[in-house]
């Protein structure tokens, strides 16, 4: 059986050693576990990015301006971020299996409400519920990896989950555009609700409950909350937190929100064309995730690798903010942009490595507050930024509005990289 992580008790007893747990799992069990966890994460990735393609259609149908559209997309990330501390406590206290199942049921309900919403307010409320439901879809798997595999395998497992799970981002591009053109965006979200139900069943089957008379006592809620404070005081927490807050948010702000309006308003791209172009960036990121993950063995350093990726990503944002891209240059930029942001799992691995075993759940969820909270802030603020520019009679915004978005994201990421450069580097290959 696979789901056997046990919350750390008052006695300080921890789970059995990672190598021992690995030997207890058959290859088939490992494959089933990874498939279920990756499928769960795919749902989250789809939901994060869906507004990027259908956003212009939602804006026209429900009369949403740029600031309202920005908040619609960012509502997912706000509720996601706010849920992270409770999710971290739940993972450490009740286990990842129960946490994943309950949150998946919430995501299912949110998808149904989104498909049925008739107002912008209804869409925002449903999207916030979806964000709450998806709040454990990455942290749950990471907690399982941290407790069942050796530390040196964590980066590759994280990269595998991010890479394969990012197929959900691909589904939210050209495939979502095609399905929306066929049965409408409401039908697409009804379908996503059904798929989420299947994922719940997959998690329940592949991660059965393991009972043991030797289970250590659970922490009290007071002790669990105290552990959050301990995690906040871990050395270099805030340096890595800052990079979490600006790295994924820059990618999600473009691909998950502004790429669709940018391509529509500046380049006149229709639904299917912008879906195809966003697909290019999303596919490049998946390739980049695997490439950056494999390069971990060559860099042998979280900090050096993250700084390299971050500097390249900042440069690409500056290019898009200063230069009007046309033709092949636009396609090339989308490819490089997606690939550069494939370094996200390295930042995630750095964050996880800062925390002792008993604080794993709370530590990684605190880092995820930065990741998802950063997306909320960036999408909401860039929505206000775009709204400062006067739209044309058709409701579109000028190229200068989107250039301002790229420059703002580049500035935030550059500042975070400077701060992050002073973080300790607890890479397992370092002495």
Image (cartoon, helix red, strand yellow):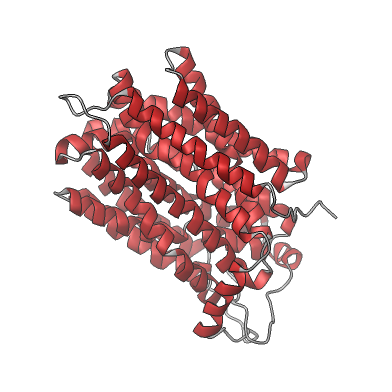
- Residue for point 69% across, 82% down: 12
Is 44 or 322 nearer to us in this picture? Answer: 322
Rendered-image quadrant of the C terminus? bottom right
- Residue for point 55% across, 46% down: 162
Badge count: 0
- In the rendered structure, the answer to whether residue 262 lies left or right of residue 142 reads left
Rendered-image quadrant of the N terminus? bottom right
The answer to whether 119 is drawn above or below residue 85 in the figure is: above
Q: Is residue 114 among the parts visible in the rendering?
A: yes
Is 375 or 169 nearer to us in this picture? Answer: 375
The answer to whether 158 is drawn above or below residue 410 in the figure is: below
Q: Is residue 112 among the parts visible in the rendering?
A: no
Where residue 28 sits, quadrant-wise, is bottom right
- Residue for point 66% across, 53% down: 350
Residue 284 drawn at (x, y percent): 53, 30
Residue 420 drawn at (x, y percent): 64, 49
- In the rendered structure, the answer to whether residue 311 lies left or right of residue 165 reads right
Residue 330 drawn at (x, y percent): 45, 19
Residue 151 drawn at (x, y percent): 72, 58
Where residue 104 sits, quadrant-wise, is bottom left
- Residue for point 67% across, 69% down: 357
The answer to whether 215 is drawn above or below residue 301 in the figure is: below
Is 4 or 357 nearer to us in this picture? Answer: 357
The answer to whether 173 is drawn above or below residue 204 in the figure is: above
- In the rendered structure, the answer to whether residue 389 lies left or right of residue 359 reads left
Q: Residue furthest right?
A: 431
């Amino acid at each position: 059986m696979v789901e056997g992580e046990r919350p750390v008790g008052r006695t300080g007893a921890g789970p059995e050693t990672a190598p021992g747990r690995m030997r207890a799992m058959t290859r088939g069990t490992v494959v089933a576990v990874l498939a279920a966890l990756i499928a769960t994460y795919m749902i989250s990735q789809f939901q994060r990015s869906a507004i990027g393609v259908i956003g212009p259609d939602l804006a026209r149908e429900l009369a949403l301006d740029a600031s309202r559209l920005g908040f619609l997309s960012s509502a997912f990330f706000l509720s996601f971020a706010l849920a992270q501390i409770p999710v971290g406590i739940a993972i450490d206290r009740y286990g990842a299996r129960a946490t994943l199942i309950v949150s998946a049921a919430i995501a299912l309900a949110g998808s149904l409400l989104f498909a049925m919403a008739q107002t912008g307010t209804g869409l925002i409320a449903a999207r916030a519920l979806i964000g709450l439901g998806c709040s454990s879809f990455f942290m749950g798997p990471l907690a399982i990896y941290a407790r069942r595999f050796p530390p040196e395998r964590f980066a590759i497992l994280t990269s595998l989950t991010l890479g394969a799970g990012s197929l959900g981002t691909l589904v939210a591009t050209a495939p979502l555009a095609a399905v929306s053109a066929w049965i409408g965006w409401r039908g697409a979200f009804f379908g996503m609700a059904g798929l989420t139900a299947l994922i719940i069943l997959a998690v329940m089957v592949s991660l059965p409950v393991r009972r043991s008379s030797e289970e250590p006592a659970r922490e009290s809620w007071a002790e669990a909350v105290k552990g959050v404070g301990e995690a906040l005081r871990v050395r270099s927490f805030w340096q890595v937190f800052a990079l979490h807050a600006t790295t994924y948010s820059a990618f999600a702000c473009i691909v998950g929100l502004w790429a669709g309006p940018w391509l529509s308003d500046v380049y006149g791209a229709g639904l299917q064309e912008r879906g195809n172009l966003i697909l290019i960036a999303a596919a490049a990121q998946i390739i980049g995730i695997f490439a950056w993950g494999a390069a971990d063995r060559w860099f042998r350093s979280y900090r050096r690798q993250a700084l390299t990726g971050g500097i390249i990503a900042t440069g690409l944002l500056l290019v898009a903010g200063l230069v009007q891209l046309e033709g092949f240059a636009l396609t090339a930029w989308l490819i490089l942009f997606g690939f550069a942001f494939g370094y996200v799992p390295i930042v995630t691995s750095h964050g996880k490595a800062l925390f002792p075993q008993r604080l794993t759940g709370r530590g990684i969820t605190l880092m995820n507050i930065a990741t998802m909270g950063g997306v909320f802030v960036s999408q909401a603020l860039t929505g206000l930024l775009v709204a400062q520019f006067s739209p044309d009679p058709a409701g579109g915004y000028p190229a200068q509005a989107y250039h301002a978005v790229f420059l703002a994201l580049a500035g935030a990421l550059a500042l975070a990289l400077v701060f992050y450069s002073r973080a300790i580097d607890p890479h397992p290959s370092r002495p």
